[in-house]
Structures are given as C-alpha cells and as structure tokens.
Amino acid sequence: MAKVFNYDEVPAVSTKAGKVKGYEFDGVHIFKGIPYAQAGRFQMPREVEPWEGVKETASYGFVCPLLTQDTPTGELLVPHRYWPQDENCQNLNVWTTALDKTAKKPVMVWLHGGGYAAGSSIEQAAYDGSNMAVQGDVVVVSVNHRLNILGFLDLSPYGEKYRNSGNAGLADLVAALRWIHDNIEEFGGDPENVTLFGQSGGGMKVTGLMQIPEADGLFHKAIVMSGVSDGKLMPIIPGDGTKIVPALLKELGIPEGEVEKLETVPYYELAKAYNTVSPALAAQGIYIGGMPMVNDYYLGEPLITGFRDHAETIPLMVGSVFGEFSFMPTPYNKEKLTEEESRAILAGAYGEHADKVKELFLKAYPDKKPVDVLALDRIFRQPSKALAQLHAKGGKAPAYLYLFSLDFPYQNGKVAWHCSDIPFIFHNTDKVEICNIPGVSDELEEKIFGAAMQFARHGNPNPEGSDEWQPVTPEQEPTMVYDRVCEVRSDYDDELLAYLEEILPPFDLMALLSQDVQH
Amino acid sequence: MAKVFNYDEVPAVSTKAGKVKGYEFDGVHIFKGIPYAQAGRFQMPREVEPWEGVKETASYGFVCPLLTQDTPTGELLVPHRYWPQDENCQNLNVWTTALDKTAKKPVMVWLHGGGYAAGSSIEQAAYDGSNMAVQGDVVVVSVNHRLNILGFLDLSPYGEKYRNSGNAGLADLVAALRWIHDNIEEFGGDPENVTLFGQSGGGMKVTGLMQIPEADGLFHKAIVMSGVSDGKLMPIIPGDGTKIVPALLKELGIPEGEVEKLETVPYYELAKAYNTVSPALAAQGIYIGGMPMVNDYYLGEPLITGFRDHAETIPLMVGSVFGEFSFMPTPYNKEKLTEEESRAILAGAYGEHADKVKELFLKAYPDKKPVDVLALDRIFRQPSKALAQLHAKGGKAPAYLYLFSLDFPYQNGKVAWHCSDIPFIFHNTDKVEICNIPGVSDELEEKIFGAAMQFARHGNPNPEGSDEWQPVTPEQEPTMVYDRVCEVRSDYDDELLAYLEEILPPFDLMALLSQDVQH
C-alpha cells in the first residue's frame, strides 16, 4: 500500500544561513545533508556562507574520507550503507514530524561510531531517523564530521592557524550542536532539551563533548553506548605532531618548513603516506593523531582526567552489550552440547578454573549457556560501570547503567555483538533482517526505545509511574539487563569479572581484531 | 510485525566451485557476492578456484572501481546505494524462493546501467531482487563486472594476452551467464529460460551480449530499457589502443615497452592518469576505451552492424521513458499555467513552430500539458523504435515496444526521467519514496511488472487470454504506453518526432548533461 510522499507542498525552512527544503514521507519531514559549517583542511570550522533562495536538502551529503576501505563480510550482523566521501563533510540530517517552532520536541542527536577514524552519519542501515521521530515524537539529527587525520592531527607546532587541528573533528561536532541550538526550533525541536547518543566511537564523542567547555549549554543529556575508554585498550598519548608531521612531509617529498602544503595534497596521497609512516611511529608509542588531544579546548577522558563540573550535571545513560567484539563463529551448536562437551570447552579455555568460571557465570547469567562465557565482553562493561560510578560520585545528576544481552538467531544463538543494540534504540529492527525475532524483538525494542525516549524527555528512563531502574550510586550499581526477560539487577557480575581478570591474560584487542573473520 | 529471518537452518547450496550459504528473509533465499569468475587486470575472466567447505555469501561483494566519484544531489529521483570498490568484482547476487533443482523457475538477470563506465549491481535502491522473486515466482540474479578502463581498454597491440582486453567487461558478463547456466538449477532456476534485462548502459549490455557468439544459448529473452545506441549520441570509434596506452604510460612515467606495468599500478593512479590524458585524445576523435570494441568476439551494435542471426531468434522487449534526461527543474507550475503563459513558453522554445508543435504533441499525448513537450526525450525513443523494427524484420521472434510516461509528484508533475521506470519493473515502488503515488503506483506497477514476468515465462508480455499488445512488424509499430491509463497505441508519435527533428538543432547530450543540476 502506498505511503504518502510530498515535496511540492512542503514549506522551505529558514535557517540562519538560508532556506532549506526537504520532503515528507509517511508523515516525517526529512532533511538530508544540511551544511552546518565549513572549514579548510586542519582549520577550525566556521559558519557556512549564507545563500540566496532555497537549497534542496533531500540527498545525503558527503561523508568523511576514510584511511582504508572496508571489505564487507559481516553484513548480516551489521548492515552498512556507504556513500561518496569528501572532506567537505560538515553536514547533518534531520527527521521531524512537525515544522512548527512551537512544537518544542526533545532533540536526539546521533553521533556515529567507527572510533574517531571511520563511520558516517548513515553508515549503518539502523541509523535512519524516521521511526524514532514518529514513535518517539522527537526530532532526530545525525551528523557527519571530520575523522582520522582530517579531524585529529596535531599541527599546532607549525603555526597558530593549526592551534586546535588535533581536535578539529570534535570542533565540527560543537559547530553542529551550535547549529542545532540556533536552528532546531524551526524544525519543531527544543534547543533547551538536546540529548546526545552515540555508540562505540560515538559514545566516546559524547563524553568528549561533555569535556569541552565550548559545548556547555548546547546539550543536556547523554547516552553512551559501548563506548567508554579507560586508556587501557588504546593508550592515551599526548597530542604532539612533531614526529608524525615531519614523517608525512618526508614521505610526500615536501620540504620541511612547507607544512601548509599538507593542506592541498590530494587526500588519497595524504592517506597513503600516513598509512605508510604511521605504524612504525605508533609501535614506538609516539603520537600519530587519529584521536582527540588534551589541550585547553578538550579536557580529556573522564576516566582519566575526571569529569568537569558541568559534565556532572548532565544526566547520563551508559551501557554495553554482552558479546561486543566476539565476532568469531563458534564451531559448535551450544544448544546441543552435552554437559561433557561443554565442560571440555570450558576446560580448554580456563583450565583448572573452568568450574569456578562456570559457577560464577551462571550466577551472573542464569539463562545463558555455560559456553556463552567465552563470548563475554571484557572491553566495555567494566569501564561503563566505572564511568557511571564516577558520574554518580558527583551527585549532581543521575547515571543509569544497562547491559544488552540478547541472543540472536545466527550461529545457533550468537550473543549480542558490538552494534547489535543500535537497531533497538532507533526503533529500526524492521530495517535489520537479523533483528526479526518473532515474539521477541518487538517487545524488547519497545522497552529499549521507550527508555531512551523517557530519558530524553525527563532525564529518567523509567516509564511513568515506575522507578524500577534506579541510578548508580557509590553504594549500589543497578544494571538494566535487556534480554528476552528484562530486569534490573544490582552488582550481579562483579565477582565474575574480577575472577576472569585474575585468571586471564590482559585483554588484547588488537590480537582479537586480527583474528576477526566477520569484520 | 517481525518477518522471519533464518540462517542456521538454511542449507548450503552446491556450485561447481564449492558450497555457498546465504540466508532466508521473509520467504526469500538471498545470496550476495557469489564469485563467478576471476581475472588479472586486462585479462579474460577464468573460472574461480574451487574452495573447500562452505563460503558464507551474505554480504554484497566489491563493486567495480569508478573513474570519478558521484556527488549525490538527485537522490529523490534516483536513490543510490554505494559500496566498497575493488577490481576483483566478478560477483553476483541471487534471490529465489526455492532451493530446489526441480523448481525450474524463469531466471531474470539484471545488468545495471551507468554506461560501460559506472554503476553496480546494487547501485540503486530499486535493484533489490526480493519482491520480484516472490511476486513473480522467478529467480533474480544481478551482476557486478569490470567497467571503464578495467573492462574496456584495448591493449591488444601490446601482446596476445591482451587480445580481448577491450571487451573484458563484456567477457565478465558472459562468464556470469555461464555460471548461471551451470549452477542456477540448484537455486531453483531454469538454465534454459534466462531473460536478460538492463537499463541505460545495462540495455546496451543486453544487446551487446546478443552480438557475442560465445553467449549464444546462455540466455533466451531480452529486455532493453532506455538503452539503445544508434551511434549518433556517442560516436562509435574502432578499438585501437595505440594512442591512449602510450599516453597513459607517459603520464605514469612508465617506459614504453613496459606495458605490463599497467597491470599493477594502483587503480587510483591509473584512473588519475587516464582522467588527465583521455579528454584531449577524445576531443580529436581518438579511441580512449571505456566502450566495447568490435572484433571477432563482439560483433557490434545492432543498429550499426545489424543483428546476428541468432540474436534475431531472441524475443525482445524494448522501450524508453517520456522524459529521460530532462532533469532540469521547471520554473513554473504547469498545472496552473494560463493558456497564454503556456503559449509564451512554447513560443520561447519553438518560435514560429510553437502552434504546430503543440498540436502534434497533444495528438500524441492528449493527457499531457502542452509544456510537457519541452521534456520529451529525443535520445532513446527513436533508436528503441528502430531496434524493434530491425529485429522485426528478421521475422524470427517478436519485438515488443513500450513507453513509460507517468508524471510524478515532484516539481508539479515531473514527467518520467531516466531510471524512473526501474522501481516498477522490479516491483520495488515500496523502496523508492517518490514512487508512492496513492491510487496510481500499485496498479501501474502490477501492469509493468506483470508484463515483464509474462515475457520472461512465455516470450509474450500479455496477460493470459489477451493479445492487446502486439509485436512490432515492418507494417505497424504498436507501443504500450504506461501511464495513469495504460494503452497500446500504434505509430502515434512519428509525426511529432519527425517535426521536432526538422525544426530543432541536433540533440546535444553533452551540453545537456553539463547543465544538469540534478545529476
């Protein structure tokens, strides 16, 4: 049955820089690729030049160029959308059900993942904002910005104009938030109620923006999904371009002293040179860019430098998923394992500790199979707890903790992997084939999505009249565990996590990613 | 409501090279990125190396690298999907409702457009095969293959191994058809009933394959959509690499006599050199590749060299759309023009001939507005008629002619543009927002799609029991006009087209494309 498409009768919307015209489909006004800033390479973003007339904003804008190309192999797990790339990528997308400045709907701003180096505002099929706008009665915004060496390369030793080039990618996001603050009312949004949500690198960007004074007042709530860094996985190296920049210049045959030529080298050649010279420096622990740098603009990861006072006033929701980077297929069907087979597998992994691991695991996750412990995340759960604790210590605003723990109908019950929760929070399980689990997905989606919408409205994820999900306090750590049965459980996995850290070698993300057959 | 996703219980399918495993969604078995051939750069494709075990084929494969990057601006008209690019792109996708070798369903093979230089098997949202597989009870295959200089660059003067490099991209398609012939039975398809369909460049590939003796017997019916070349738009230049190849070598700093180094230059650098040197040669009318070349493998465009005997035995459906490349927005609302305004616009375009143009136009298209004539295609309608005529002269198999003439709810009734018919033949209007026209799209889609399915089954597009749509004969040229009202009309626009050619300067595609604000 045909849905309604409307273009001709959709009004243009006024923004500070000029009028934009999107379209309406199935009750949602959609704007794609609205420019929110512009910048020369390595420069701070500035406001876009005003334009005359009406700009059609009905096609997604360029996404940031990447250093390497993906080889798509795990599309069932995370279906992707790719798009033409250009460093002039400061554009955003808006979904809303009302072009009415009195509507004042909560605004949800999606910050995509891919570390600080990859991804885009539309990288995953699950990033579409239409369902959220309708089902949640909110305005949804998703943002493209500069990544990798375009967004995060310290050139500050080479001139004042490069003062903050090491954080240009975050500065783009601040510019996007300022655009939202200045313009979103015309799209039916409330500039005084803006919630950031982001996953993986997008989660890190959320906490990153909490640590940037310039962004204060531009957003009011924060959701951090599988994206807390505690400096253990990837070492935090102070921003210092004095090694990587000369190496780049040499590789490109540019004389020292002509750093500004890096501004005009074709991106392909810049990236190729960077990919050639950076691994050797990185192996020596030398700064190579690609991450924000601590300076007077960006004050550093909360778990390392502490939360700023203002950041503590922002209600926080933080969590992770059961399996995260456990993309390796299992060579067995866990549903059909005998107790002996299961025991043998655990013994192979944990040796003499196998029985204790099993006991602690089933205490923490009574509905899982013992072998599921092999897929248990060791990357994001602990730092997510730590972040919630740190925020709770401030005592100024609540911090809610969750874990997404669903098994999917793939490889005989694969447990939730990195990104598998995104379709649920976006109310987009209908757009991701593997999320279609009859009798399960729809109900779970309502819970996860509903909590996010409540949190955006009220800073509290509970449905009206409920207080089941309590915030973390220094004394207690309630976690909303999302699964076939959802329940809030307190301090349920500390013993298990501590024991695993005790008996296992330190987690090696790089080794795991190099084995990765799915991604 | 959740649809059913199934992976674990889907059987692997045996192909000549090894087993492949796809997945099932909403009743369709889907396989993405099955490799059908492999080839060194500029070499003929050969069979893929057999593999052990089961290959997961659930992610789309690489698409062919392009010479330039798109700037997406007309996404409402033609929504795109982009994908990672690699020259090892010989892979195909299959949609079927039965993994049963006795099912013997008609096979529909989609050849994408983008000239011979661009596009991919998934370039447009409308290229998804699920709906066609279900609604048409057919097996759908779409194919990636080498394009531009990777698929069409004559190096034959430089060695026997490059003998057919000028047609490598067509040879990939022949290899894909051979793969289908050898393997499609396992996917429920009938290798003895294979219909090619393609649009724009894809239509040219369909006729191209009709002119390749090696492809005889590998397909049995042909649908050519907006893709007939008569040599007028783009001159046919004999394949001859003796100018472009030395120019490339020089630009890349490769000594003459070391042509084989072109096989290993990174594609980006090869493309950059090509984009630098080819325009000057092209301006002199010198062969620069990028198109098939006539040799003993490929026998040339039918309208120029005539149909081969075998090609005349293949039932043909051929047609075009009303507006094709009329992407310029109109500065007025045609629904609201007064008769005077309309007359003034026509006078501006046709001067003293305006009244006659209007009269002939309304005779041909009585339901259109007079100003619609400004958007009337002058590229594909005439050659499509000529191709049908030429084929009809053979008298061995029918040739059916159509025109797609729908107005869309965009810019006050924009008439059908290039690619706007694709969602209808794929039964994918639900996937293309602008195609959602209540009370119109669904019915028209059933007609267009139904005709294609009937044609695939029986070589005749009429519903059972009807003979309304007659094939073209040397005496008569019936055209199925698809619009809000669909009807077969004979020889209805000859006078109009002849008059326009008489009074207007020769059509200049390049000038039009350079004005193009939408694409």
Image (tube, coloured by chain):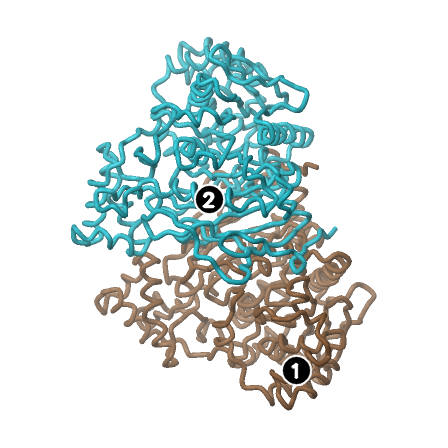
Chain colours: A cyan, B brown
Relative image position of residue A395 (x, y in whole percent): 47, 17
Tell me the kind of residue under disc 1. Answer: Ala
Q: Nearer the viewer, residue A92 or B96?
A: A92
Q: In which quarter of the image is residue B117?
A: bottom left
Could you tell me how far apart the alpha carbons at marks 2 and 1 are, in whole angstroms?
A: 46 Å
Q: Nearer the viewer, residue A15 or A412?
A: A15
Tell me the kind of residue under disc 2. Answer: Ala
Which residue position is annotated with label 2?
Answer: A176
Q: Quadrant of residue A131?
A: top right
The answer to whether A328 is drawn above or below residue B148 in the figure is above
Q: Nearer the viewer, residue B408 or A73?
A: B408
Which structural element holds mark 1? helix
Q: Look at the image and tell me in which quarter the C terminus of chain A lies.
A: top left
The answer to whether A97 is drawn above or below residue A265 in the figure is above
Relative image position of residue A147 (x, y in whole percent): 38, 44
The answer to whether A386 is drawn above or below residue A276 in the figure is above
Q: How many numbered callouts?
A: 2
Same-chain status of marks 2 and 1: no
Relative image position of residue B501 (x, y in whole percent): 60, 86
Which residue position is annotated with label 1?
Answer: B344
